[in-house]
Amino acid sequence: KMSEMIERVAKAINDVDGQYVQPQPWHYAEAKAAIEAMREPTEEMIKLSYEIILASNTPIIHEDVKLTYQAMIDAALKE
């Protein structure tokens, strides 16, 4: 079974021009490669993660993890 994230990325790869059709097998391979390339965070991603966690000033909760993850991906997208 394909992971939910690989499925999402494959659909996004296939929908770049706004003309969505069912992803083909190679889209899943491309999606997996893209996710694997993002596995190691950049220094900017790590910095943003620390900033969010330290700003919460409370025990880490689910929402902190979600915000940290989103901030790290946002940092990767703007680099």
Image: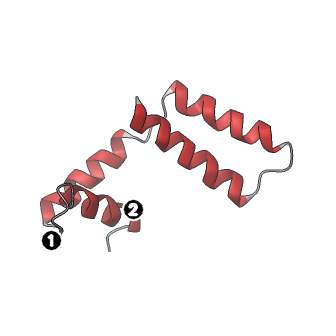
Residue at numbered disc 1: 21
Of labels 2 and 1, earlier in sequence is: 2
Residue furthest to the front in view is 18
Residue 37 place in picture, x, y as percent: 34, 39
Q: Relative to residue 14, is residue 35 depicted above or below?
A: above
Q: Residue at image x 56%, y 48%? A: 69
**Total marks in image:** 2
- The residue at the point 40 percent across, 40 percent down is 38
Q: In the image, is residue 38 above or below residue 19?
A: above
Check disc 1 and give the amino acid type.
Answer: Val
Residue sitting at 59 percent across and 32 percent down? 46
Crowdedness of circle 2 by 10 Å Cα count: few (<14), some, many (20+)? Answer: few
* Picture disc at residue 47: none
Of the 4 image quadrants, the one containing the N terminus is bottom left
Give the residue displayed 62% in from the left and 45% down from the top.
68
Viewer-side residue, 3 vs 19:
19
Crowd around label 1: few <14 · some 14–19 · many ≥20 (10 Å): few
Q: Position of residue 76 (x, y in %)?
A: 43, 36
Q: Identify residue type, mark 2.
A: Met
Q: Find residue 10 and report its image quarter.
A: bottom left
Quadrant of residue 7 within the rendered picture: bottom left
Kindly identify which residue carries mark 2.
5
Q: Work out which quarter of the rendered image holds the C terminus and state it.
A: top left
